[in-house]
Amino acid sequence: MKPEPDAVPADVPAHRTTARAPRLAAALIALTAAAGLAAGYAAVLDRTGSHAAAVARMLNYFTNTTGLVVAILFGAIALRPGSWLRPWPVAGTALACLLVGIVQRLLLAGLRVPQGADRVADILLHLAVPALVPLFWLTFVPKGSLRYRDALLWALYPLAFLAVTLVRGATTDWYPYPFVNVARFGWAAVMANVGGIAAGFLATGAALVALDRRLGAAARSDPRP
C-alpha cells in the first residue's frame, strides 16, 4: 500500500515540521530590531554629521540599548536555538521591551512628532519590537522555570542604565528623558518618577513570572504528548 502523497515519511521526526518556526520568528525579530536601529542611526547621523557622535547619542537611550540586546539575542536564537532559546534571557528581554513600549506610550508620546527615518525607528522599536518579543516568549519558550526573584535580577539592567544616565547628566547637564532631568525638576521629582517606573517594572515582572508558572503547570498536567 502506497503512502499518501502529502504524508510525512515515518522516519522523519515529528518535531521537524515545526522546529523552524521559532528560528524564523527569532530572525524576524532580530531583523526588525536591527532595521529600527539602522533607521535611528541614519537619522542621528544626519543631524550630527559624525559617526562617533551618532553612536554615542544612540547609546544614551534605553530604547536603543534594548533594541541592540534584542538584535543580538534573537539573532543568536535564529542561528543556534539549542544554545540560546532559554526562558530566563528571553523573558527578561521581553520585560525590558514592555518597559520601552509602556514608557513611550505613557510618558513620551506626543512630546515630538518623528519624521522620516525617525518615524521608521519609532514604529519598529517602540511598537513592533515591544509586541513581538513578548509574543515570542509566550509562543515558543518553555514555561515553568522562572522564579519571582528573577524580576529583581532583570531590574539590574534598567537600574544600571539609570545610574549611568544620572551620573552623565550631572557632568554634562543633559538628560535623554524629561522624567529623569534632575537639572529641571530636581532630585525629589526624579526619584518619584523613577520609583513609579521601578514599581511598575517589578509588578510586570512578577506578573510575567506568575503567568510562566501557571502555563508551566498547565503544560505538565496536559496528558497530550
Image: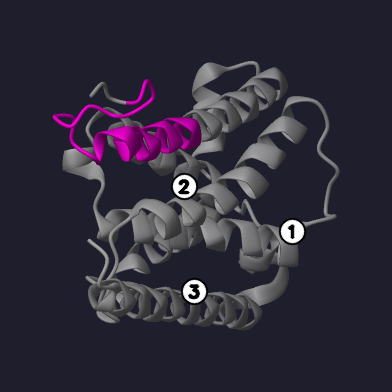
Q: CA distance from mark 3 to mark 1?
A: 17 Å
Query: Circle 3 is placed at which residue position?
Result: 201
Asked which colour scheme the image uses, the reply is one colour
Can residue 61 be seen?
no
Local packing at callout 3 (Cα closer than 10 Å; few below 14, some 14-19, many 20+) is many
**Is residue 127 toward the left or the right of residue 134 in the image?**
right
* Residue 41, magenta (yes or no): no
The residue under the point 58% across, 17% down is 50
* Residue 20, magenta (yes or no): yes
Q: Are marks 1 and 2 in contact (CB under 8 Å)?
A: no
Instruction: Find the residue positioned furthest to the front.
Output: 1
Local packing at callout 2 (Cα closer than 10 Å; few below 14, some 14-19, many 20+) is many
Query: Circle 2 is placed at which residue position?
Result: 66
Mark positioned earlier in the residue sequence (2 or 3) = 2
Q: Secondary structure at mark 1?
A: helix
Local packing at callout 1 (Cα closer than 10 Å; few below 14, some 14-19, many 20+) is some
Q: Nearer the viewer, residue 3 or 116?
A: 3
Q: CA distance from mark 2 to mark 3?
A: 15 Å
The residue stretch that appears in magenta:
4-30
Image coords of residue 104 (percent x, y): 68, 58
